[in-house]
Image (cartoon, rainbow, N blue to C red):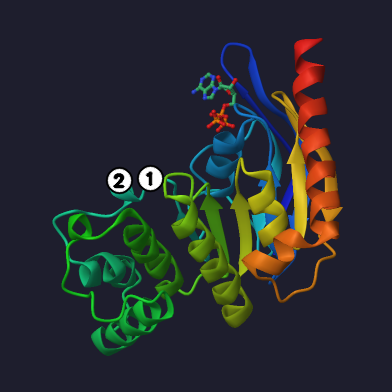
Amino acid sequence: MLSVSGLRKVYQPHVEALRDLTFTVERGELVCLVGPSGCGKTTLLRCIAGLLEPTGGKVSLDGREVSGPPPGLAMVFQEYGRSLFPWMTVRDNVELPLKQKRLPRTRRSALVEESLTAVGLAGSESAYPWQLSGGMQQRVAIARAVAYEPSTLLMDEPFAAVDAQTRADLEDLVRSLWQRLGVTVLFITHDIDEAVYLGQRVLMLSSSPTVVQDEITVDLPAERDQLHTRADPRFTELRTHVYEQIQAAKLSTRTG
Ligand SMILES: Nc1ncnc2c1ncn2[C@@H]1O[C@H](COP(=O)(O)OP(=O)(O)OP(=O)(O)O)[C@@H](O)[C@H]1O
């Protein structure tokens, strides 16, 4: 379980990025976070990943307070081009964190094979990232995160740089992996439809200095597909609500 409690971050001299963030992501839950641009999501992610020290409050992962990179956490970033090493094959990219985890060779090979199969890339082990499309590279990044067997997966706008059709496929991949592996997922996106399509809950952040402005439970059926879920009138109601909250967050900043 991920717990963020009273989290505050002030950059020197006087930039209050996060004011007071409190939320939890239960074990095995998939929660999406949306907010206006500049609302401090990068700051939040760095605090969760133990890369930035909060000014106040705390973050705990699986009951332990985060004070450096936590062992049970894996991340997938927007910029797959920069998160994969171009001089390493797909296999070596996926295997690297497993070596750092000091897993034995046979276990590493099994995990690499399993995770690449799970993302639909069996047979691409010997390719280099630059030989693959953007969507395939992002699949490699997801395989690398999954192979690590994390308790919690942080995804930072992972599909912002891929085309719409690939994005839809990758969204479905994330939901199916999440359902199969029972991993806890915090998924950050600017895309309101994506948040409602993917999440069990959606948290809406205000503009900076940031607080949790609102939260909805996505009461859509667990079995989702791009065609029927997005055509469901309830989907429209939920996305409209999230949209209105984000607009209100922007307006309250403009009017001071
Ligand atoms: N190192 C820093 N020093 C001072 N201010 C900073 C620093 N990093 C971020 N900020 C400020 O903190 C606020 C939140 O920034 P952050 O990068 O976390 O937002 P973000 O939501 O990731 O942005 P975007 O949506 O544009 O990617 C912004 O006002 C930003 O200018």
Q: Which class describes the residues within 10 Å of circle 2: few (<14), some (14-19), or many (20+)?
A: few
The residue at the point 83 percent across, 34 percent down is 244
Mark carried by residue 127? none
Q: Nearer the viewer, residue 144 or 198?
A: 198
Q: Which residue is mark 2?
A: 82
Q: Where in the figure is residue 160, as x and y percent of width and height?
A: 48, 45
Return the x and y of residue 21 as percentages of the image width and height: 76, 39
Is residue 2 something one can see in this rendering?
A: no
For the C terminus, which image quadrant? Answer: top right
Determine the image quadrant of residue 211: top right
| Residue at the left extreme of this rendering | 87
Residue 19 image position (x, y, % from top left): 74, 28
Secondary structure of the residue carrying tag 1 is loop
Write down which quadrant ligand 1 falls in: top right
Crowd band around label 1 with a 10 angstrom C-alpha radius: few (<14), some (14–19), many (20+) = some
| Residue 92 location, quadrant | bottom left
- The residue positioned 83% from the left and 47% from the top of the image is 215
Amino acid type of the residue that numbered disc 2 sits on in the rendered structure: Arg
Q: CA distance from mark 2 to mark 1?
A: 6 Å
What residue appears at the point 63 percent right and 78 percent down from the top-left corner?
179
Residue at screen point 28% across, 54% down: 84
Q: Nearer the viewer, residue 121 or 64?
A: 121
Q: Quadrant of the N terminus?
A: bottom right
Asked if marks 2 and 1 touch (Cβ < 8 Å), the reply is: yes
In the image shown, does 231 or 14 lie closer to the viewer? 231
- The disc label shown at residue 79, or none: 1
* Residue 44 appears in the rendering: yes
